[in-house]
Image (cartoon, rainbow, N blue to C red):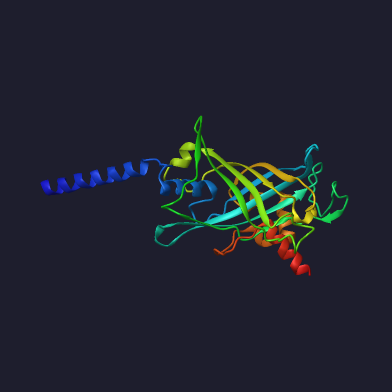
């Protein structure tokens, strides 16, 4: 009887320790915990789910010594799923994303655009980036964060870019300003702190702000003019593609219906809007 009681007490102690361990919140200063938090915020730890981040905003043009111009509105989304890598070493984030350029007054999706700088009418090329994939490792991952108070937290990522352009100027004189692509994409993800740090949660609601700074787009044919574009947007996480605005879903189904789901496998290299422009132009030739 004493042996039985001792075993029973040992089991109770083990279960209590296990429950206590599960109750401990994630520590965002630890790479593995930081990654788990980011994945449930950015997408979902459940590989079956395919959350969508949707955002809408405006695009402004800067040219030296002239007023800023509101050129476009836009809507965009990224649809994602996550896979664990072998040996629980980290995660694969598997996504595709689209963005449509809209009239700044009516929000109608554009097909052509009268360039106010060059007076040329050009064909609008919307963004269809597939794939947009990333690998994250438990031992080296860290996304910075701010405790915003009132039970809110923000994980953020400021991505500054400088790399050889897919559109060398000698080959694309009307579309490319330089042989180097330079820009920046700035992400802020806002969520409930307790949900983020709770180990049992797999997928949590979140809001997003996204800004982008870049050269003029290749299809604008403004390579010889100084200036840049500034994108500013805000949005939120959806449970699925079905929650998107009807206008966006209709446009996707009419043009690229595969964007209703995340990709089925991890592929490289990633596609960017500059690479997509090059692909479309070469196919036309």
The residue sitting at 78% across, 50% down in the picture is: 109
Closer to us: 266 or 203 = 266
For the question of whether residue 203 can be seen, the reply is no
Closer to us: 52 or 274 = 274
Q: Is residue 94 left or right of residue 86?
A: right
Q: Is residue 85 above or below residue 107?
A: below
Q: Position of residue 192 (x, y in %)?
A: 51, 37
For the question of whether residue 259 can be seen, the reply is yes
Q: Is residue 153 left or right of residue 53?
A: left
Where on the picture, by quarter, is residue 97? bottom right
Q: Position of residue 232 (x, y in %)?
A: 68, 41
Q: Is residue 148 left or right of residue 103?
A: left
Quadrant including the C terminus? bottom right
Q: Please, which residue is most extreme toward the right here?
A: 119
The residue sitting at 75% across, 69% down in the picture is: 283
Q: Position of residue 31 (x, y in %)?
A: 42, 48
Where on the picture, by quarter, is residue 231? top right
Closer to us: 37 or 29 = 29
Q: Please, which residue is most extreme toward the left here?
A: 2
């Amino acid at each position: 009887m004493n042996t039985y009681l001792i075993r029973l007490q040992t089991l109770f102690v083990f279960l209590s320790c296990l429950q206590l361990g599960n109750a401990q919140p994630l520590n965002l200063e630890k790479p593995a915990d930081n990654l788990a938090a980011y994945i449930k915020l950015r997408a979902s730890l459940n590989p079956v789910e395919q959350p969508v981040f949707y955002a809408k905003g405006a695009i402004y043009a800067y040219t030296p010594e002239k007023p800023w111009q509101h050129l476009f509105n836009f809507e965009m989304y990224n649809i994602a799923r996550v896979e664990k890598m072998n040996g629980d070493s980290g995660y694969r984030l598997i996504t595709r994303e689209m963005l449509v350029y809209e009239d700044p007054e009516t929000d109608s999706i554009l097909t052509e655009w009268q360039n106010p700088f060059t007076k040329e009418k050009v064909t609008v090329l919307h963004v269809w980036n597939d794939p947009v994939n990333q690998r994250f490792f438990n031992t080296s991952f860290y996304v910075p964060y701010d405790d915003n108070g009132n039970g809110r937290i923000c994980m953020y990522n400021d991505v500054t870019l400088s790399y050889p352009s897919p559109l060398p100027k000698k080959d694309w004189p009307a579309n490319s300003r330089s042989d180097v692509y330079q820009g920046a994409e700035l992400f802020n993800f806002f969520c409930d702190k307790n949900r983020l740090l709770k180990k049992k949660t797999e997928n949590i609601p979140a809001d997003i702000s996204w800004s982008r700074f870049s050269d003029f787009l290749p299809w604008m044919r403004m390579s010889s003019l100084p200036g840049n574009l500034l994108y500013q947007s805000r949005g939120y996480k959806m449970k699925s593609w079905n929650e998107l605005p009807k206008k966006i879903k209709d446009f996707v189904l009419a043009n690229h219906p595969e964007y209703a789901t995340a990709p089925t496998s991890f592929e490289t290299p990633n596609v960017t809007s500059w690479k997509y422009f090059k692909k479309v132009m070469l196919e036309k030739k």
